[in-house]
Image: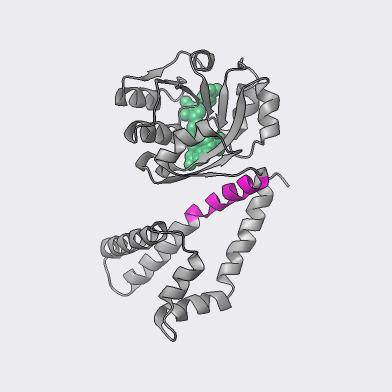
Amino acid sequence: MRIGFVGTGAITRAVVTGMIRFEVPFERIALSPRNADTAAELAKLDSRVEVCASNQAVLDSSDVICLAVRPQIAADVLPALKFEPRHHVISFIAGKSLAQMREWLGDVAAVIRAIPLPAVSEGKGSTALCPPDAVARTLFAPLGAAVEVEDEHQFDALSAATATMASYFALLEEQASWLVAQGLPYASARSFLSGFQVGLAHETTKDARPYSELIGEMCTPGGLNEQVTNELAQRGTYQHYIEALERIMKRVQGR
Ligand SMILES: NC(=O)c1ccc[n+]([C@@H]2O[C@H](COP(=O)([O-])OP(=O)(O)OC[C@H]3O[C@@H](n4cnc5c(N)ncnc54)[C@H](OP(=O)(O)O)[C@@H]3O)[C@@H](O)[C@H]2O)c1
């Protein structure tokens, strides 16, 4: 497979690194020259990775094209490029619908939307794909979990769910601050919480039990975990999450 990337920023760095590390089958990876430092760094990882002179040169030498420029410049960059009917296009560009992409790209073999997450570089990133696609699955399944959906509304919902990353860290920071207030050094609090979280995350990947079952397992009747989760539920903490996601969904869909 000859894969090209238009836009060589943070997410391209993560995806290309993951593809090399986890032995995704490819013949060649072509990178657009911006950002020059990231492109040069990736080219050093594997002799099959090459930095092209222009975005068009990436298209001309690739069959699968990953689009990874920021949404704000997509309308300027994409219509200026000449796509070919052989191009299998995978767009990482947030908030740009399949219909919008088809309008910009013209006659191409396929247009797929994808949300690769930064942990793909570690083989632990979920990637949402819409619509289901064998080529995209081959590229992203080895990098973590490839979750394929038919319906673009569902894809937008997965996109909205990725807006919870900062609040996840905020919750950890609150817990760390509380431990510090109890007299622990921040480094000890952080180390304890990180190991604790890795253990919990690992628990969720061992099988497909619903989270509700895991909650039930943690909640000994009258126990400490039951007390915390009930208190948070009664104060509307979880409901606030849902309301925030509803507002994010409106933004994601431009409503
Ligand atoms: N980061 C994530 O976790 C993530 C996850 C899923 C999807 N996405 C999507 O992926 C896209 C890229 O995100 P990112 O976080 O990787 O952004 P980023 O780090 O800003 O990368 C974008 C890259 O595009 C380059 N660029 C600017 N103008 C260009 C042009 N005319 N032609 C080619 N490349 C150009 C920039 O180069 P310079 O540095 O030289 O300006 C920059 O390196 C966005 O649409 C985003 O919504 C990101």
Position of residue 9 measured from the top left corner of the image (x, y, whole percent):
45, 31
Quarter occupied by residue 199: bottom left
Q: In which quarter of the image is residue 131?
A: top right
Task: Residue 5: give x, y in percent of width and height.
Answer: 48, 25
Residue 25 belongs to magenta span: no
Most extreme residue toward the right, as rendered?
255
Q: Pick the residue in front: 249 or 106.
A: 106
Q: In this view, does 210 lie above or below 72?
A: below
Q: In which quarter of the image is the N terminus?
A: top left
Q: Give the range drawn in magenta.
A: 153-166
Q: In this view, does 244 lie above or below 10?
A: below
Relative horizontal placement of residue 93, taking residue 205 as reference (left or right): right
- Taking the magenta stretch, the answer to whether it contains residue 158 is yes
Q: Main secondary structure of the magenta part?
A: helix
Residue found 57% across the figure and 20% down from its top = 87
**Vertical arrangement, residue 8 with respect to residue 246, above or below:** above
Q: How many marks?
A: 0
Q: Residue 51, position in %: x, y?
A: 41, 18
| Residue at screen point 59% across, 73% down | 236
Residue 241 falls in image quadrant = bottom right
Q: Nearer the viewer, residue 80 or 111?
A: 111
Of all residues shown, which one is farthest toward the bottom? 222
User: How is the rendered protein coloured?
Assistant: one colour
Look at 58% across and 38% down and name the residue there.
132
| Residue at x 36% of width, y 61% of height | 197
Towards the viewer: 194 or 28:
28
* Whole-percent x, y for residue 155 in the image: 61, 45
